[in-house]
Protein backbone atom coordinates (compact mmCIF):
# COMPACT_ATOMS: atom_id res chain seq x y z
CA UNK A 1 0.00 0.00 0.00
CA UNK A 2 1.12 3.56 -0.61
CA UNK A 3 2.53 5.28 2.45
CA UNK A 4 2.00 8.73 3.90
CA UNK A 5 3.20 11.33 1.40
CA UNK A 6 4.67 14.65 2.46
CA UNK A 7 6.05 17.61 0.53
CA UNK A 8 8.29 19.43 0.24
CA UNK A 9 11.13 17.30 1.56
CA UNK A 10 13.20 20.31 2.55
CA UNK A 11 12.43 24.01 3.00
CA UNK A 12 14.69 26.91 3.88
CA UNK A 13 13.15 30.27 4.73
CA UNK A 14 14.06 33.43 6.57
CA UNK A 15 12.46 34.36 9.86
CA UNK A 16 9.14 36.16 9.59
CA UNK A 17 8.39 34.48 6.27
CA UNK A 18 5.51 32.05 5.86
CA UNK A 19 5.69 28.39 4.87
CA UNK A 20 3.25 25.58 4.19
CA UNK A 21 3.59 21.82 4.31
CA UNK A 22 1.38 19.26 2.67
CA UNK A 23 0.43 15.75 3.70
CA UNK A 24 -1.54 13.02 1.98
CA UNK A 25 -2.35 10.16 4.37
CA UNK A 26 -2.85 6.51 3.56
CA UNK A 27 -6.08 6.03 1.67
CA UNK A 28 -9.00 5.43 3.99
CA UNK A 29 -7.26 6.55 7.15
CA UNK A 30 -9.62 8.70 9.18
CA UNK A 31 -7.10 10.12 11.61
CA UNK A 32 -4.26 12.44 10.69
CA UNK A 33 -1.56 13.88 12.92
CA UNK A 34 1.11 16.55 12.61
CA UNK A 35 4.19 16.17 14.78
CA UNK A 36 7.14 18.52 15.27
CA UNK A 37 10.57 16.96 15.80
CA UNK A 38 13.27 19.35 16.94
CA UNK A 39 16.83 18.14 16.52
CA UNK A 40 17.83 15.88 19.38
CA UNK A 41 14.29 15.43 20.65
CA UNK A 42 11.44 13.04 20.11
CA UNK A 43 8.47 14.07 17.98
CA UNK A 44 5.83 16.19 19.71
CA UNK A 45 2.18 16.16 18.68
CA UNK A 46 0.95 19.49 17.26
CA UNK A 47 -2.53 18.61 16.08
CA UNK A 48 -4.79 15.61 15.52
CA UNK A 49 -7.63 15.45 13.01
CA UNK A 50 -10.49 12.98 12.87
CA UNK A 51 -11.77 13.19 9.30
CA UNK A 52 -12.02 16.97 8.78
CA UNK A 53 -12.48 17.88 12.44
CA UNK A 54 -9.84 18.83 15.00
CA UNK A 55 -9.60 16.39 17.92
CA UNK A 56 -6.64 17.90 19.74
CA UNK A 57 -4.70 21.07 19.02
CA UNK A 58 -3.66 21.84 22.58
CA UNK A 59 0.05 21.86 21.68
CA UNK A 60 -0.31 23.96 18.52
CA UNK A 61 1.06 27.53 18.82
CA UNK A 62 -2.06 29.07 17.39
CA UNK A 63 -0.66 32.56 17.11
CA UNK A 64 1.54 31.42 14.23
CA UNK A 65 0.61 27.85 13.31
CA UNK A 66 -2.54 26.76 11.52
CA UNK A 67 -3.64 23.49 9.98
CA UNK A 68 -6.60 22.31 7.98
CA UNK A 69 -8.01 19.13 6.52
CA UNK A 70 -10.95 20.49 4.61
CA UNK A 71 -12.15 17.38 2.78
CA UNK A 72 -11.03 14.87 5.38
CA UNK A 73 -8.21 13.57 3.21
CA UNK A 74 -5.02 15.59 2.71
CA UNK A 75 -3.89 18.31 5.08
CA UNK A 76 -1.77 21.44 5.14
CA UNK A 77 0.19 22.90 8.02
CA UNK A 78 1.15 26.56 7.84
CA UNK A 79 3.52 28.71 9.83
CA UNK A 80 3.17 32.49 9.60
CA UNK A 81 5.40 34.20 10.58
CA UNK A 82 8.19 31.70 11.15
CA UNK A 83 10.65 32.00 14.01
CA UNK A 84 14.13 30.56 14.37
CA UNK A 85 12.88 28.05 16.94
CA UNK A 86 10.49 26.59 14.37
CA UNK A 87 13.44 24.88 12.68
CA UNK A 88 12.53 21.22 12.89
CA UNK A 89 11.27 18.22 10.97
CA UNK A 90 7.50 18.24 10.57
CA UNK A 91 6.08 14.75 10.46
CA UNK A 92 2.67 13.74 9.26
CA UNK A 93 1.14 10.46 10.39
CA UNK A 94 -2.14 8.69 9.83
CA UNK A 95 -4.09 5.83 11.31
CA UNK A 96 -7.35 4.13 10.59
CA UNK A 97 -8.42 4.64 14.19
CA UNK A 98 -11.73 6.03 15.27
CA UNK A 99 -12.52 7.47 18.70
CA UNK A 100 -12.79 4.78 21.30
CA UNK A 101 -10.49 2.26 19.64
CA UNK A 102 -7.69 0.61 21.55
CA UNK A 103 -4.71 2.67 22.55
CA UNK A 104 -2.40 0.40 20.58
CA UNK A 105 -3.59 1.72 17.26
CA UNK A 106 -0.68 1.80 14.83
CA UNK A 107 0.42 5.08 13.28
CA UNK A 108 2.05 5.31 9.87
CA UNK A 109 4.52 8.15 9.45
CA UNK A 110 5.67 10.06 6.40
CA UNK A 111 9.33 10.94 5.82
CA UNK A 112 8.79 14.49 7.02
CA UNK A 113 9.57 18.01 5.88
CA UNK A 114 12.80 19.45 7.21
CA UNK A 115 12.40 23.17 7.84
CA UNK A 116 15.33 25.50 8.39
CA UNK A 117 14.56 29.05 9.49
CA UNK A 118 17.48 31.45 9.03
CA UNK B 1 1.01 11.83 33.52
CA UNK B 2 2.47 9.13 31.35
CA UNK B 3 6.03 9.53 30.13
CA UNK B 4 9.08 7.57 29.06
CA UNK B 5 12.77 8.10 29.74
CA UNK B 6 15.41 6.75 27.43
CA UNK B 7 18.50 6.31 29.52
CA UNK B 8 21.10 6.54 26.76
CA UNK B 9 21.23 9.18 24.06
CA UNK B 10 23.85 7.23 22.11
CA UNK B 11 24.80 3.55 22.05
CA UNK B 12 27.65 2.02 20.03
CA UNK B 13 28.08 -1.71 19.53
CA UNK B 14 30.17 -3.86 17.25
CA UNK B 15 28.52 -5.76 14.46
CA UNK B 16 27.45 -9.20 15.67
CA UNK B 17 27.28 -8.25 19.35
CA UNK B 18 24.10 -7.80 21.41
CA UNK B 19 22.12 -4.57 21.46
CA UNK B 20 20.45 -3.12 24.57
CA UNK B 21 18.50 0.14 24.41
CA UNK B 22 17.01 1.15 27.74
CA UNK B 23 13.64 2.73 28.42
CA UNK B 24 11.84 3.41 31.70
CA UNK B 25 8.22 4.47 31.83
CA UNK B 26 6.07 6.37 34.25
CA UNK B 27 2.39 5.57 34.34
CA UNK B 28 -0.35 5.38 36.93
CA UNK B 29 -1.79 2.30 35.23
CA UNK B 30 -0.72 -0.40 32.82
CA UNK B 31 0.57 1.47 29.80
CA UNK B 32 0.65 0.73 26.10
CA UNK B 33 4.28 0.98 25.01
CA UNK B 34 5.87 1.01 21.59
CA UNK B 35 9.33 1.12 20.11
CA UNK B 36 9.76 3.02 16.85
CA UNK B 37 12.83 3.20 14.62
CA UNK B 38 13.83 6.13 12.42
CA UNK B 39 16.39 5.56 9.69
CA UNK B 40 17.99 8.62 8.08
CA UNK B 41 15.65 10.36 5.66
CA UNK B 42 12.92 7.80 6.28
CA UNK B 43 9.69 7.83 8.21
CA UNK B 44 9.26 6.39 11.68
CA UNK B 45 8.57 2.68 11.59
CA UNK B 46 6.91 0.62 14.31
CA UNK B 47 9.27 -2.05 15.67
CA UNK B 48 7.02 -3.62 18.28
CA UNK B 49 4.26 -2.88 20.77
CA UNK B 50 3.28 -3.99 24.25
CA UNK B 51 -0.39 -4.17 25.06
CA UNK B 52 -0.40 -6.35 28.22
CA UNK B 53 -0.97 -9.63 26.40
CA UNK B 54 2.57 -10.91 26.97
CA UNK B 55 5.51 -9.39 28.79
CA UNK B 56 8.05 -10.46 26.15
CA UNK B 57 7.24 -8.85 22.83
CA UNK B 58 8.84 -9.81 19.54
CA UNK B 59 9.14 -7.27 16.77
CA UNK B 60 10.54 -6.94 13.31
CA UNK B 61 14.18 -7.43 12.29
CA UNK B 62 14.98 -9.65 15.28
CA UNK B 63 14.24 -7.07 17.95
CA UNK B 64 12.35 -7.84 21.13
CA UNK B 65 11.44 -6.03 24.32
CA UNK B 66 10.47 -7.16 27.79
CA UNK B 67 7.93 -5.33 29.92
CA UNK B 68 8.97 -5.40 33.60
CA UNK B 69 6.40 -3.82 35.84
CA UNK B 70 8.54 -4.16 38.97
CA UNK B 71 11.29 -2.14 37.30
CA UNK B 72 8.97 0.08 35.21
CA UNK B 73 11.16 -0.76 32.23
CA UNK B 74 10.66 -1.70 28.59
CA UNK B 75 14.16 -2.30 27.26
CA UNK B 76 14.77 -3.13 23.60
CA UNK B 77 17.22 -5.91 22.75
CA UNK B 78 18.65 -7.79 19.80
CA UNK B 79 21.03 -10.74 20.08
CA UNK B 80 23.29 -9.77 17.19
CA UNK B 81 23.63 -6.30 15.70
CA UNK B 82 23.68 -5.75 11.97
CA UNK B 83 24.97 -2.72 10.11
CA UNK B 84 21.44 -1.98 8.90
CA UNK B 85 20.32 -1.51 12.52
CA UNK B 86 22.08 1.85 12.71
CA UNK B 87 19.28 4.35 13.33
CA UNK B 88 17.48 6.42 15.95
CA UNK B 89 15.21 4.45 18.27
CA UNK B 90 12.29 5.93 20.19
CA UNK B 91 10.46 4.49 23.15
CA UNK B 92 6.83 5.63 23.10
CA UNK B 93 3.93 5.55 25.56
CA UNK B 94 0.35 5.94 24.43
CA UNK B 95 -1.62 8.52 26.40
CA UNK B 96 -4.88 7.88 24.61
CA UNK B 97 -5.81 6.52 21.17
CA UNK B 98 -3.31 7.93 18.70
CA UNK B 99 -1.65 10.28 21.19
CA UNK B 100 1.93 9.20 21.42
CA UNK B 101 4.48 10.58 23.87
CA UNK B 102 7.98 9.98 22.56
CA UNK B 103 11.18 9.60 24.50
CA UNK B 104 14.16 11.69 23.49
CA UNK B 105 15.61 8.90 21.38
CA UNK B 106 18.70 6.71 21.36
CA UNK B 107 21.06 6.84 18.41
CA UNK B 108 22.45 3.38 17.70
CA UNK B 109 25.82 3.18 15.93
CA UNK B 110 27.14 -0.13 14.63
CA UNK B 111 30.91 -0.53 14.47
CA UNK B 112 32.10 -2.74 11.59
Image: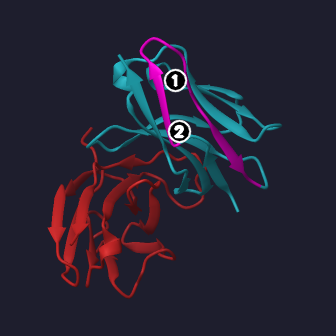
Q: Chain of mark 2?
A: B
Instruction: Name the one closer to the observer, B11 or B68.
Output: B11
In this picture, which residue range is highlighted in magenta? B9-27
Instruction: Residue A33: tell me if it is visible.
Output: no
Whether label 2 touches label 1, CB < 8 Å: yes
Q: Element under label 2?
A: strand
Q: Residue A46: horizontal and vertical position, in percent?
A: 43, 69
Q: At 38% across and 20% down in the image, what residue appears?
A: B111
Q: Chain of mark 1?
A: B
The residue at the far right in this view is: B70
Quadrant containing the C terminus of chain A in the rendered view: bottom left
Colouring used for the render: by chain
Q: At 49% across and 19% down in the image, what residue appears?
A: B62
Q: At 52% across and 51% down in the image, what residue appears?
A: B104
Q: Is residue B84 magenta?
A: no
Quadrant containing the N terminus of chain A in the rendered view: top left
Disc 1: which residue: B63
Left or right: B72 as drawn, with respect to A97: right
Hue used for the chain lettered A:
red
Tell me the crowding category of disc 1: few under 14, some 14 to 19, or many 20 or more residues within 10 angstroms, Cα based.
Answer: many
The answer to which quarter of the image holds residue A32 is bottom left
Q: Residue A92: horizontal and vertical position, in percent?
A: 33, 58
First in sequence, mark 2 or 1: give its number: 2
Disc 2: which residue: B35
Q: Residue A90: horizontal and vertical position, in percent?
A: 32, 61
- Residue A100 got which mark? none
Q: Element under label 1?
A: loop
Q: Residue B7: horizontal and vertical position, in percent?
A: 61, 42
Q: Which chain is cyan?
A: B
Q: At 17% across and 77% down in the image, what residue appears?
A: A14
B83 w.r.t. B35: above or below: above
Amino acid sequence: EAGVAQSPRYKIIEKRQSVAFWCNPISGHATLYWYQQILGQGPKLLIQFQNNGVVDDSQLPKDRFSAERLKGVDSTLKIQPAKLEDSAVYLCASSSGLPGLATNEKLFFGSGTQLSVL
Amino acid sequence: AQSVTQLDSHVSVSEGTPVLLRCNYSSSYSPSLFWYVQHPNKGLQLLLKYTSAATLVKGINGFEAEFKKSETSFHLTKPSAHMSDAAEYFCVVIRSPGKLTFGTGTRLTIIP
